[in-house]
Amino acid sequence: MSIMPLSPLGEERLLTSEEVATVFHVDPKTITRWAAAGLIRAIRTPGGRLFRYRPADIRAILSSPDGQAEVVEAVSA
Amino acid sequence: MSIMPLSPLGEERLLTSEEVATVFHVDPKTITRWAAAGLIRAIRTPGGRLFRYRPADIRAILSSPDGQAEVVEAVSA
DNA sequence: AAAGAGTAGGGTAATTGGGGCT
DNA sequence: TCTGTCCCAATTACCCTACTCT
């Protein structure tokens, strides 16, 4: 998988838990934990099984010293 | 360079306290102290327990004669 | 439709960071 | 003052299984 810049909708391709885990250098399980705990915004696939993440949200966390990326919007629920 | 794979966001993977400790040949605890004291920039995981560091920041410190790497926002993507 | 790959969930052990002390 | 080690609590990592996605 290479660099697929944008999705057909013109947005950046969503990241998988494993990809986000790679960024933070943590276990993929930890990412799903953060998502489940509402610590990071996640998008659930219609099947309800998978978590996907917006690159912008991840970058926001990386830019925050506290890792507290303001959850601008409450998680879907 | 480029032996180190880039993360899905196009950045280098973050380093753990232990990895940074290895670089400086000190105890990991010392690294977290530096981070807590603001001597080196650190990114906390959303879980709030772990510290992660940008390779670029560490390199900056290593390149600085006094080890005084400005804590400025080095990266602006 | 079937098979293979990938990912989330559960449970438990290990690691990490905070505070205190040397 | 700064660093390393001890104890403790919370988070994180690794095991296996079940279900989804391609």
Image (tube, coloured by chain):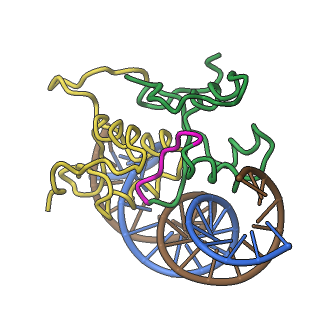
Chain colours: A yellow, B green, C blue, D brown
Of residue A55 and residue A6, the one placed in the foreground of this image is A55
| Residue A77 belongs to the span the image colors magenta | no
Q: Residue at x 46, y 58 (%)?
A: A29
Front-most of residues B48 and D13: B48
Looking at the picture, how far across and down is residue D5, in whole percent? 83, 68
Residue D20 place in picture, x, y as percent: 27, 55
Q: Where is residue A37 in the image (x, y as percent from the top left)?
A: 32, 64
The quarter of the displayed image where residue A64 is located: top left
Main secondary structure found in the magenta portion: loop
Q: Is residue B7 left or right of residue B64?
A: left
The quarter of the picture where the C terminus of chain A appears is bottom left
Quarter where residue A53 is shown: top left
Question: For this view, does D21 lie left or right of residue D15?
Answer: left
Residue drawn 45% across the image and 59% down it: B48
Q: Which residue is drawn at 69% across and 43% down?
A: B19
Identify the image quadrant of the N terminus of chain A: top left
In this view, the residue in front, D4 or B23, is D4
Residue plotted at (55% across, 38% down): B14
Q: Where is residue A9 in the image (x, y as percent from the top left)?
A: 14, 26
Residue A53 shown left or right of residue A24 in the figure: left
- C17 shown above or below A5: below
* Numbered marks: total: 0
Residue range of the region highlighted in magenta in the rendering: B39-47
Vertical relation: B55 (above or below) B46: above
In front here: A61 or B35? B35
